[in-house]
Image (cartoon, coloured by chain):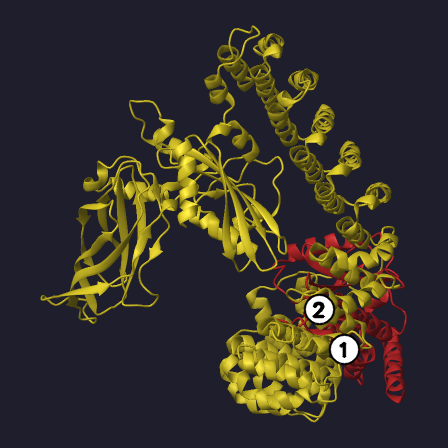
Chain colours: A red, B yellow
Amino acid sequence: DLCPSVKNILLLDSEGKRIAAKYFSDDWPTNNAKDAFEKTVFTKTQKTNARTEADIVMFENKIVVFKFVQDLHFYVTGGEDENELILATVLQGFFDAVGILLRGNVDKKEALENLDLILMCLDEVVDGGIVLETDANSIAGKVASHSIDSGAPLSEQTISQALATAREHFTRSLLR
Amino acid sequence: DYSPFLGIEKGAVLQEARVFNDPQLDARRCSQVITKLLYLLNQGETFTKAEATGVFFAVTKLFQSRDIGLRRMVYLMIKEISPSADEVIIVTSSLMKDMNSRTDMYRANAIRVLCRITDGTLLTQIERYLKQAIVDKNPVVASAALVSGIHLLQTNPEIVKRWSNEVQEAVQSKAALVQFHALGLLHQIRQNDRLAVSKLVTSLTKGAVRSPLAQCLLIRYTSQVIRESGVNNQTGDRPFYDYLENCLRHKAEMVIFEAARAITELTNVTTRELTPAITVLQLFLSSSKPVLRFAAVRTLNKVAMTHPMAVTNCNIDMESLISDQNRSIATLAITTLLKTGNESSVDRLMKQITNFMSDIADEFKIVVVEAIRSLCLKFPLKYRSLMNFLSNILREEGGFEYKKAIVDSIVILIRDIPDAKEGGLLHLCEFIEDCEFTYLSTQILHFLGNEGPKTSDPSKYIRYIYNRVILENATVRASAVSTLAKFGAMVDSLKPRIFVLLRRCLFDNDDEVRDRATLYLNTLGDGSVAETDKEVKEFLFGPLDIPLKNMETSLKNYIQDPLEEPFDINSVPKEVKSQPLAEKKASGKKPTGLGAPPAAPASAADAYEKLLSSIPEFAAFGKLFKSSAPVELTEAETEYAVNVVKHIFDSHVVFQYNCTNTIPEQLLENVTVIVDASEAEEFSEVGTKPLRSLPYDTPAQTFVAFEKPEGVPAAGKFSNVLRFTVKEVDTSTGEPEDDGVEDEYQLEDFEVVAADYILKVGVSNFKNAWESMVPETERVDEYGLGPRESLAEAVNAVINLLGMQPCEGTEVVQSNSRSHTCLLSGVYIGNVKVLVRLSFGIDGAKEVAMKLAVRSEDVSVSDAIHEIVASG
């Protein structure tokens, strides 16, 4: 199959612990296999400084692109023959959409408090390995529009603020 | 460390999920509980079947709420649980209602959920809605339907294929991602129809595609069409190349890169075609984005393997990447430079690498070591600086794989570059003085034993070897004892001193070490300065020309059923069984260093031998020399399938016809093969063994035996007719009718050829084996093979003609090379060892010339091999 495909998207904390992860291929059939992969990815990328630009590493016949902010590590994995720049585009879309949804306060605490937004965001980026959307504003817009009118989730104050910003960001991008 | 999920526990959350059943739903509360459930699943927690069912049913209640956010969480939850077929029915109507909702978000998500959990039957019910959704004006809805279509095509292709009109319309969409998803689905629907794909590519490459992702897809499809259509022979132009080149000027980097990569991967790409692609990749090398640099350097690295000259323009940019923060990029840059560098740049390059080696991981170091090995073989004059580099890194810290890669490289350099030998051996000696890996120590000791005695001053290695006896573990000590003995056997002047050392080993506390020392002391003579008997040398250190696997099987059989007489090593079959393809690929690729030759896998020959010896008529023919691979005598899918295996004995051949009856309504009886040997003059038929009965789909054998002159590789052509009595079978009862009809069935001809008389028996070290043959048995001649398809094809044809075992991976021809040397080894009928060295050359008109050198234990066999080639 020639269609670009994503094998997984990971969001880990600064100790390599899983915050949210979505696997789309059967390369990792068990949770142990997933844990082991996350551990390897984390160890191999720990010392890099992927903060201004996304960085890349290749191992076990897979390509992983990654970007860090605060105590959050974002990863997107593809097969060894995948176009690296497509994977990087997916990573950037996810990364920026989370940034919009957490209105710039991107760290582990915020991510956990708004885990529902993160999970929906993952759901809007890739569907069963196929890239669904790469534009951060569209992704965040879809997630935010779902939450409009709902009561504020886990942490009331932060989320209502987040939604306001997300909506504002979205309308701004429409006006542009 | 604060977390809202601190102390979360599955049982408690499942209790909380009861709020889903409240008559007055609290949407916010419900969303929180679902988030917690999803958190648990995401952390790897699993639900039992009962728990999952419970949660699922509770969640379905939430469709009552009109809260959009909660609905969205419900969708996620249903997808995570992946309900069973009977559970799916419960949510189908709710989801179908959402699919027809006026809210686009509901529609898009309901489509994705429903398609994810549905089976084929439900799909026909919702097909109409999905087709509408594909052409929906809301891009999110259209994409949801298209992506779902891509997934469903795997399980329900016949339904999805009916949507191609709608999908085709969606390809024209102005929304970028809709176009991408539609193109992906349309291609998958048509992928088996080459003409349709070609038409699709032709129309779209004219410029209707806007989205970068869709453009990347189109580039992939275009490359596929190019691969299948080939170059236009008249103009020399490649169809669609202009499109790929235009994409190099696209504004999206992902498209530029996709096109550049596609160009570099074109079959038989020319320098002219490559140049524009290399130019854009070179620009990427100095990008500020690591991902872009990595993609470019990785692609250029691949190009360098086949077209090193095309990449040399990038060398300056590559050199600056050696200090790249990203070690993968640095390693790729170095190995590219090692491939493209010229002789004069080697020293400078080595200096840069030395600084780099200390701060990269072992896996990268191995890649660099392998690249250096190839470089050294390319520029043998530079061996001194490269060997020094290898010995320096050998002394530094590193894991087993890394150390093994270095040792392997040194061994290969010693073998291929004579000047490097003495220095290389001393580097290895120093390494085993402080080596923590038993495997590497024993392998190096073995290698030292073979090479050390042939150097100008063998005595200088003894100290290193004897130190092992004093300092190491039992395995290494035993190896060292054998190595000492080899020096004693090969270097007469050293023998008295070696004996002193070996006698000390008699007091070792390990059985194996003492046994070895005792064996050598008792066979190598009396310890005076005297030549060692040739037969003793052969016995102690000669190659074991029997595949170890066969030896193991024979010994196991012997132990199971011990006889009065001792085990006879001559009873072990020598044929190397054909390896499974995957294994062959792996071992054929890399030059083997220290490792022993690949072990021969288990054999079908044992089975043949058992089968034949169980037939009294053939028992007197003696020992089976060789059995051929089956030769098909019928076309595929005919009424009767027959193939033949040729069994060669010293003065007989037996043809084993394997027959299969593929007609359920027939039973065959008294099956024989009538063989016409009029074109095989030296053969005369001596017996047949008919097959009593051949029922449907149960393979069985019939045999025909011929006599032929003893030990002579007689050749000839045989034509065959299958003769039998056919009886109709009532397929309902399986009972055959009583009366049958005689019938015949024409089979294809086959030949017995020279290759049938040669066993594939490999040697572990071809050079040593070659040198140990008497040079006077050598016969050399040159042959013109005429125009051939390629060098590889010519090499293969000769290997097949001779039926011998290719050694040291020399059956693999580098693509684009103009000359090749192939080493073959085998055993000729009469148990005569024979070695063949083939040198091929090909010119611009694809004319292939070949020089054939043969050495064997018998001059007449050397001549016979030439005869085979001359008449082949």
In this view, the residue in front, B771 or B99, is B771
Q: Quadrant of residue B394?
A: top right
Q: Position of residue B421 (x, y in %)?
A: 69, 29
- Placement of the N terminus of chain B among the 4 image quadrants: bottom right
Q: Are marks 1 and 2 on the same chain?
A: yes
Q: Position of residue B861 (x, y in %)?
A: 40, 35
Q: Position of residue B583 (x, y in %)?
A: 53, 48
The alpha-carbon separation of the residues under discs 1 and 2 comes to: 11 Å
In this view, the residue in front, B192 or A78, is B192
Instruction: Tell me the residue at 84%/72% (across/down).
Output: A96
Q: Chain of mark 2?
A: B
Where disc 2 sits, the SS reads helix
Where disc 1 sits, the SS reads helix
How many labels, in total?
2
Q: Which residue is label 2 attached to?
A: B263
Residue B162, numbered circle: none
Q: Chain of mark 1?
A: B
Residue B660 appears left or right of B88: left
Q: Which residue is label 1 attached to?
A: B246
Say what amino acid the circle numbered 2 marks.
Answer: Ile
Q: Is residue B162 above or below residue B548?
A: below
Mark earlier in primary sequence (1, 2): 1
